[in-house]
Image (cartoon, rainbow, N blue to C red):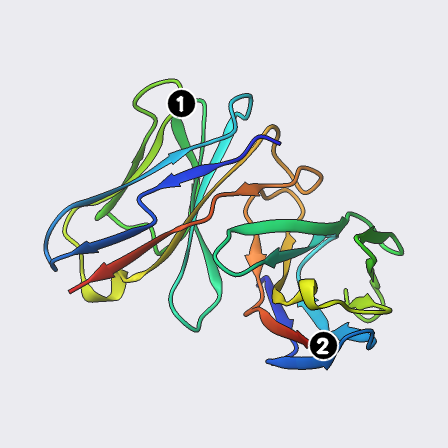
Amino acid sequence: EPEVTQTPSHQVTQMGQEVILRCVPISNHLYFYWYRQILGQKVEFLVSFYNNEISEKSEIFDDQFSVERPDGSNFTLKIRSTKLEDSAMYFCASSDRQGGNQPQHFGDGTRLSIL
Amino acid sequence: GNSVTQMEGPVTLSEEAFLTINCTYTATGYPSLFWYVQYPGEGLQLLLKATKADDKGSNKGFEATYRKETTSFHLEKGSVQVSDSAVYFCALIPTGANNLFFGTGTRLTVIP
C-alpha cells in the first residue's frame, strides 16, 4: 500500500538555526498537510497546500514557517529560526481530494528537538 | 469553535476485554468524524470514519457510531487483543473545511 514517507525521523537543531523537514506524499495525491504534536498535547493543524499554494493555515503557522513543493515528489516544511517551543513531532499528510469524505494519510513523523 | 474531547488515559485492559473510548465533539454544522490509531514507532493510521449522523464506521473489529444528539463518536471493540495496544485519536473535519481537529489521544495497553 502506498505510504507517506518523512525524513529524517529525528532532527536535533540548535535554537536559531533553520531546519527543513521533508515529506514524500502518496504519488497521486494532490492535497498536502503539515501537523505537529508537542509532547503531551493535541495534534494540531499547521497548513494545507494545493496546486502549489497554501490553501489554509492556522495561527501557529507564522512568518517563521514556510512550505514548498520543490519538485514533483517532495513537500517540505521550513522553520527559519527555530525556537525551543518548536520542539515537537511533525506529521505530514496527503489526500487525493479535499473535504471530510477523503481520509488523510499520514507519515510516521519527524521528531524535532531544539536545543 | 471546533474541538474534540477524549477520554483520559491510559487505559489498561486484559486480552478479550470490552473496550470503550469516549469521544465528544463541538462543531458547527455536520462534521465528518474519524478515529486514527498510532502503533508504537509508527505514524497515524485511519481506523474508521463516519460522515453523517447515525452512520457507523467499522474496521478490524472496532466500531463507532456518529451520534448527533449527544455529539459523540465513542470507539468500541468487543474483544481486544495485545496487538491493539496503541494510542487512539478521535478527530473531526468541520463542514466545508479540510483540516483535522484532534483529541488528545488515549493510550491503550492490552495485557495477556
Q: Quadrant of the N terminus of chain B?
A: bottom right
- The chain letter under disc 2 is B
> Residue A68, percent across and down?
31, 30
Kind of residue indicated by mark 1: Ser
Q: Determine whether the residue tagged by mark 2 lies in a helix, strand or loop.
A: loop
**Do marks 2 and 1 share a chain?**
no
Point out which mark residue A73 bears: 1
> Residue B69, percent across and down?
85, 68
The residue under the point 60% across, 65% down is B86
Distance from the alpha carbon under mark 2 to that under mark 1: 43 Å
Q: Which residue is mark 2?
A: B112
Above/below status of A15 relative to A55? below
Q: Residues within 10 Å of mark 2 (few under 14, many from 20)?
A: few
- Location of residue A59 (image quadrant): bottom left
Kind of residue indicated by mark 2: Pro
The residue lying furthest to the top in this view is A72
- Location of residue B102 (image quadrant): bottom right
